[in-house]
Image: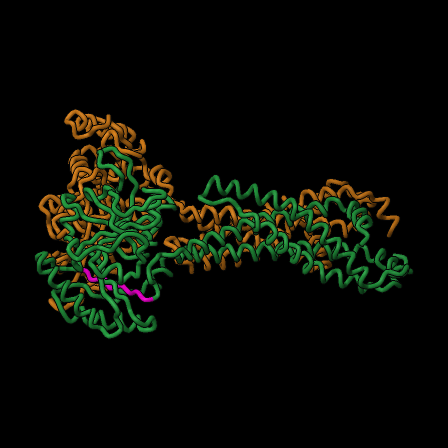
């Protein structure tokens, strides 16, 4: 029966090409708009490190004064220098990484080589293993290098290409902010989106061009800042001039905890640390700690730009209007066939069968609309990519969106078709046959 | 026209009419709000800064091998002198943060120095004696800084010295509503006496609540190139790019190892365009959505109208046979569409208002001004009339002879 209905639907398409075309166009436009934004939203809210994200946690403690005006209950996002070092040395977690980022002037060994400002991430040895950063050449530096403030650097693939023409540069030297560093390794392209590990400069964007040991980095001249800092109190010498100031938070810290027992243990250690600092008089507030998992952390930080949420609502508004439009056109189309339906009813088709036949026709419109909507969504994503927004690179067409687009198209066409089909199935056969 | 006839005819297609009304109402609601959002973005993009944007260029220099503070200051003086001799440059200064830049420097400012006194974050501009003139600021109260009031960065941030400050009119209104701010005292870096008020100066980038955009302070500080960027005011706006090239050459040719690159030099106009690119993109996106919706609505109206015309061919023929002219038929369909559109627009206004309330609740948006409603209404009336024109013309060409044929 389905095959027959399909035949009838295609026949009816050919008979009223304009009406059918308009319906298809309306569905296609709505699908194009909503799938575009759905793809953007899907990519932006994706898990940046699938497989590893469950074991990654972001510890926070609260070193703020008790009576800070306008302070919220949530502890600061980042750690102060002292807390960062203390928690780094806590040693309860199997792996941990301390980090921050800035820009540094870099040049090749030779005295007259050109100078460039390069984005860098200062971190500790576990960073690479913990986040699964793939190496092309060499390897990460060791915990020993961290402790001895070794002058070593890990380059990104692009940076290695730019400085050394892409060859194995392990062991070569670089001058970073007046000091000489030895290349320890080169990492492959690695840029999880959202950039969960440091959301201070926005959640989407490019990865750093090189990685330095955190404590070595702190020894560099202070002209380049220490990444975004959040300071309180009115000591103007804090911040820019003294990263070790107690009233400034700026260092990001992540730990890897593989089992629920480790998570509980780490949480207890954080509370214990806070209580100890409270007793020492360094923390004015009672223990106020957080240990958010990666996904919870992204939720808490609301990484999806407000404009994207808004545009998604707008896109689904467009789809709704397109559906209302399609309902109107379907009513017109089905009523036009009243005569034909009357004959079918008179020849013995039940109301249910007529209803189903009309729904099949609506479904065909949906499939056609979905097929036409896919190139429109592709065009929409291309347009998003042309926008000067940080998440532009994430506006890619995901194969999983293909199915979603077709399903959404058929669903919306069927939803739009239910009521017109019901109406068509109520056509009184006698009246129609008489007027033929 | 025969409204009664049209209404009774429409009564026979209640459902289709309802759908059309709904569709027009939804479009009206979304288009009104989208236009409002576009307007809000445009307003934001055209906010005044109070500086002479058309004639300003900035050139940043990054130090690489930090020398002694004295050497850097001496180099800065040499640079300023060299930049000042470029033919098309009217004045040169140095500024700690650039307008439409990436960074924001600010301090908590209050009217008391008690530790827990309420403060607001106000952006702070540091610069030498030429800064106000280079920016083209307008003094509305008090005076400019005197030459002996300029201090170093350390002296200001030490907080010990009582450094005078010039504030913007908006900040003066905030702290001293209805009074002259000149001579009053604020607490930012220790105790700061307000010596002057400028008409307008804004934050380098949006920070904090919207009203604080026009809160700014100007401190008399002699900076080194490592602490800021060179700001040049050119005589002729068409020479800006040439001035940037000459300035980069002058800076490159002199001084210690440092980063002088076209990447750190730009006109203020270019900086503004880059700063507002997201707003521009969003505005264009909304324009696209409006067009899309209007097209879809027109398609819906046109589709149903042509269905009705086909269905009523016989009636049209009868009307023509009993004396209706072509323009009568044309006007019938136009009036019918006008009635439906009006219903839709009335409902759409209510929806637009409701949608605006929802948006106000979830996003930082103002109330939809009243004049958006007539604009939306007229737009949809025009769209409706355009969409129905084709089918109505076809209807008016139905020959009267149709009436004599049995269907």
**Left or right of B254, for residue A159:** right
The reply to whether residue B26 is in sight is: yes
Q: Position of residue A201 (x, y in %)?
A: 30, 49
**Left or right of A410, for residue B9:** right
> What coloring was used for the rendering?
by chain
**Left or right of B240, for residue A425:** right
Q: Colour of chain B?
A: green
Residue visible at 35% across and 42% down in the picture = B177
Dominant secondary structure of the residues highlighted in magenta in the image: strand
Observer-nearest residue: A209 or B23?
B23
Residue visible at 61% across and 52% down in the picture = B374
Q: Please give the range of residues in magenta.
A: B55-62
Q: Position of residue B207 (x, y in %)?
A: 33, 47
Chain shown in orange: A
| Quarter where residue A356 is shown | top right
Q: Position of residue B332 (x, y in %)?
A: 78, 56
Residue visible at 48% across and 58% down in the picture = B284
Residue visible at 14% across and 46% down in the picture = B161
Please say if A77 is above or below B224. above
The reply to whether residue A130 is in sight is: no
Residue furthest toward the bottom? B87
**Left or right of A416, for residue B12:** right
* Residue B288 falls inside the magenta stretch: no
Count of labels shown? 0
Q: Position of residue A160 (x, y in %)?
A: 22, 61
């Amino acid at each position: 029966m389905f095959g027959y209905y399909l035949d009838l639907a295609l026949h009816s398409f050919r008979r009223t090409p304009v009406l059918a075309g308009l319906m298809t166009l309306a569905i296609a436009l709505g699908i194009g708009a909503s799938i575009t934004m759905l793809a953007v939203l899907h990519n932006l809210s994706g898990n940046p490190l699938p497989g590893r994200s469950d074991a990654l946690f972001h510890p926070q403690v609260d070193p703020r004064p008790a009576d800070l005006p306008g302070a919220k209950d949530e502890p600061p996002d980042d750690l102060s220098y002292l807390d960062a070092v203390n928690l780094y040395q806590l040693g309860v977690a199997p792996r941990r990484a301390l980090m921050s980022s800035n820009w540094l002037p870099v040049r090749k060994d030779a005295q007259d080589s050109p100078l460039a400002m390069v984005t860098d991430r200062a971190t500790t040895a576990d960073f690479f293993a913990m986040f699964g950063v793939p190496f092309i050449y060499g390897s990460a530096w060791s915990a020993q290098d961290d402790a001895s403030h070794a002058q070593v650097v890990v380059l990104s693939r692009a940076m290695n290409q730019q400085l050394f023409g892409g060859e194995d540069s392990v062991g070569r030297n670089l001058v970073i902010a007046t000091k000489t560093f030895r290349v320890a390794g080169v990492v492959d392209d690695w840029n999880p989106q959202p950039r969960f590990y440091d959301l201070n400069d926005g959640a989407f964007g490019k990865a750093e061009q090189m990685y330095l040991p955190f404590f070595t980095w702190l020894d560099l001249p202070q002209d380049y800042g220490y990444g975004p800092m959040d300071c309180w109190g009115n000591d103007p010498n804090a911040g820019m001039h003294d990263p070790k100031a107690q009233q400034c938070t700026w260092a990001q810290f992540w730990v890897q905890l593989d089992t629920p027992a480790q998570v509980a243990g780490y949480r207890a250690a954080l509370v214990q640390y806070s209580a100890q600092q409270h007793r020492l008089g360094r923390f004015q507030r009672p223990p106020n700690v957080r240990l958010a998992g990666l996904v919870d952390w992204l939720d808490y930080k609301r990484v999806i730009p407000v404009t994207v949420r808004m545009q998604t609502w707008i896109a689904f508004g467009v789809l709704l209007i397109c559906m209302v439009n399609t309902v109107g056109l379907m009513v017109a189309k089905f009523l036009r066939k009243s005569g034909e339906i009357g004959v079918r009813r008179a020849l013995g088709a039940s109301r249910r069968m007529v209803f189903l036949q009309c729904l099949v026709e609506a479904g065909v419109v949906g499939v056609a609309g979905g097929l036409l909507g896919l190139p429109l969504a592709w065009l929409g994503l291309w347009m998003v990519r042309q926008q000067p927004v940080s998440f532009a690179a994430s506006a890619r067409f995901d194969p999983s969106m293909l199915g979603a687009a077709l399903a959404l198209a058929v669903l919306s066409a069927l939803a739009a078709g239910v009521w017109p089909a019901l109406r068509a199935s109520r056509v009184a056969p006698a009246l129609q046959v008489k007027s033929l | 026209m025969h409204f009664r006839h049209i209404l009774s005819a429409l009564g026979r297609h209640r459902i289709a009419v309802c759908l059309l009304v709904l569709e027009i109402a939804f479009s009206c609601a979304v288009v009104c709000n989208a236009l409002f959002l576009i307007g809000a973005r445009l307003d934001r993009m055209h906010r005044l800064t109070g500086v002479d944007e058309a004639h300003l260029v900035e050139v940043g220099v990054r130090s690489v091998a930090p020398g002694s503070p004295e050497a850097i200051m001496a180099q800065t003086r040499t640079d300023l002198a060299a930049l000042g001799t470029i033919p098309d440059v009217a004045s040169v200064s140095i500024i700690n943060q650039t307008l439409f830049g990436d960074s924001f420097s600010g301090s908590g400012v209050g009217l008391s120095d008690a530790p827990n006194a309420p403060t607001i974050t106000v952006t702070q501009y540091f610069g030498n004696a030429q800064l106000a003139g280079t920016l083209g600021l307008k003094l509305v109260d008090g005076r400019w800084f005197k030459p002996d009031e300029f201090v170093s960065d350390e002296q200001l941030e030490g907080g010990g010295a009582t450094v005078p400050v010039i504030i913007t009119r908006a900040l003066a209104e905030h702290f001293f509503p209805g009074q002259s701010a000149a001579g009053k005292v604020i607490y930012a870096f220790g105790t700061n006496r307000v010596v002057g008020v400028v008409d307008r100066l804004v934050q380098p980038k949006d920070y904090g609540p919207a009203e604080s955009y026009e809160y700014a302070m100007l401190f008399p500080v002699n900076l080194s190139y490592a602490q800021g960027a060179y700001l040049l005011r050119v005589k002729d706006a068409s020479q800006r790019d040439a001035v940037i090239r000459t300035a980069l050459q002058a800076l490159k040719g002199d001084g210690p190892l440092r980063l002088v690159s076209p990447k750190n030099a730009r006109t203020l106009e270019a900086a503004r365009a880059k700063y507002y690119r997201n707003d521009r993109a969003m505005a264009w996106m909304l324009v696209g959505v409006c067009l899309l919706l209007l097209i879809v609505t027109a398609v819906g109206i046109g589709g149903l109208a042509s269905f009705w015309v086909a269905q009523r061919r016989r009636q049209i023929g009868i009307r023509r046979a009993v004396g209706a002219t072509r323009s009568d038929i044309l006007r019938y369909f136009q009036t019918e569409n006008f009635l439906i559109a009006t219903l839709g627009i009335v409902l759409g206004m209510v929806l637009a208002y409701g949608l605006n309330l929802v948006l106000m609740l979830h996003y930082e948006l103002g109330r939809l001004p009243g004049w958006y409603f007539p604009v939306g209404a007229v737009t949809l009336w025009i769209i409706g009339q355009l969409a129905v024109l084709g089918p109505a013309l076809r209807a008016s060409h139905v020959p009267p002879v149709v009436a004599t044929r049995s269907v």
